[in-house]
Amino acid sequence: MRKCVIFLILVAVTVFVFAACNSNSDSQTNETIQDPQTASGNQNPNESTMQTEHETNLFQHPELGFSFEYPSTWEGRFTVENLPGGDEDGAARGIQLFHVATQQDLESEFVGWLFSIVRTSAATWTNDIPAPFGEVLAETEEYVFFINLPSDVQWDFDNPQGASAIEYQEMEGQLDVVIDSFRLME
C-alpha cells in the first residue's frame, strides 16, 4: 500500500511539472512583439533606423562624434536630452536617455533615467566613475567617452509589477546592446 501511495505521488508531481512546462512554452510562443514602425517616431532628428539581424536602431550624435545601437523595441519609449554645459574650459558634454512611461506614471521629469553618455576632455579626465555605475566606452587623444548608469531605483518602486516598472527593467537589462555597439564617428 505504501509503495502505491508513493507511486501515485510521483505520477502526480510528474504530471504537474509537465503541465507547468507546457503552459510556459505556450505563453512564450504567443508573445506579441510591438512593431517598431508603429511607434511614435524618432525622438531626435539625427536618429535613423537600421534594421539588422539583432533588430536594433542606430542613434547618431554627429556633434559629439559618437553613435550606438539600441534595441528596436525601445523605439518611442525614451527621450534624449542634452546634458547642460559645453566644451569651454574642458567642461563635459553629453546626452541623457529617459524612460517615457516612468516619467508619465510618476509625473516627473527627474525619474526614469536609463543612462548618460558623456564626452569630456582627456586632459582633465580623472577616471572617477565608481563601478558598477559606468565605464569608459572610448578614448582619443582629445576626449574620453563614458557611460554613467543610475545608482538608485529609477522606476516606480511602489508598483514594481506595474507596466512602466517592468518595461524600464527590461530596457535596463538590454543596456549591453548600447555599450557593446558604441562607436566613434569620423
Image (cartoon, rainbow, N blue to C red):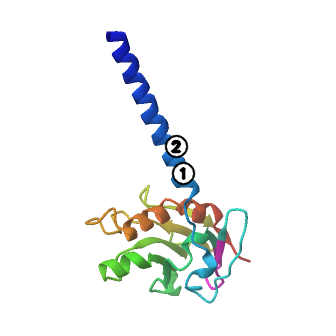
The quarter of the picture where the N terminus appears is top left
The residues bearing labels 2 and 1 have C-alpha atoms spaced at a distance of 6 Å
Residue 153 vs residue 141: left or right?
Answer: left
Residue at 37 percent of width and 79 percent of height = 103
Residue 19: in magenta span: no
| Coordinates of residue 49 in the picture (x, y in percent) | 68, 78
Residue at 63 percent of width and 70 percent of height = 69
How dense is the environment of label 2, judged by Cα within 10 Å: few (below 14), some, or many (20 and up)? few
Say whether marks 2 and 1 touch (CB < 8 Å): yes
Give the extent of the magenta segment. Answer: 57-67
Residue 58: in magenta span: yes
**Residue 168 in which image quadrant:** bottom left
Q: Majority secondary structure of the magenta segment?
A: strand
Residue situated in front as seen by the camera: 117 or 171: 171
Q: Furthest-left residue in view?
A: 158
Residue situated in front as seen by the camera: 140 or 113: 113
Residue at 64 percent of width and 83 percent of height = 47
Residue situated in front as seen by the camera: 108 or 30: 30
Residue situated in front as seen by the camera: 127 or 111: 111
The quarter of the picture where the C terminus appears is bottom right
| Coordinates of residue 51 in the picture (x, y in percent) | 71, 71
Residue 33 vs residue 3: left or right?
Answer: right
Seen in the picture, residue 115 relative to 129 is either above or below; the reply is: below
Q: Amino acid at mark 1?
A: Asp
Q: Circle 1 is placed at which residue position?
A: 26
Q: Circle 2 is placed at which residue position?
A: 22
**Residue 149 in which image quadrant:** bottom left
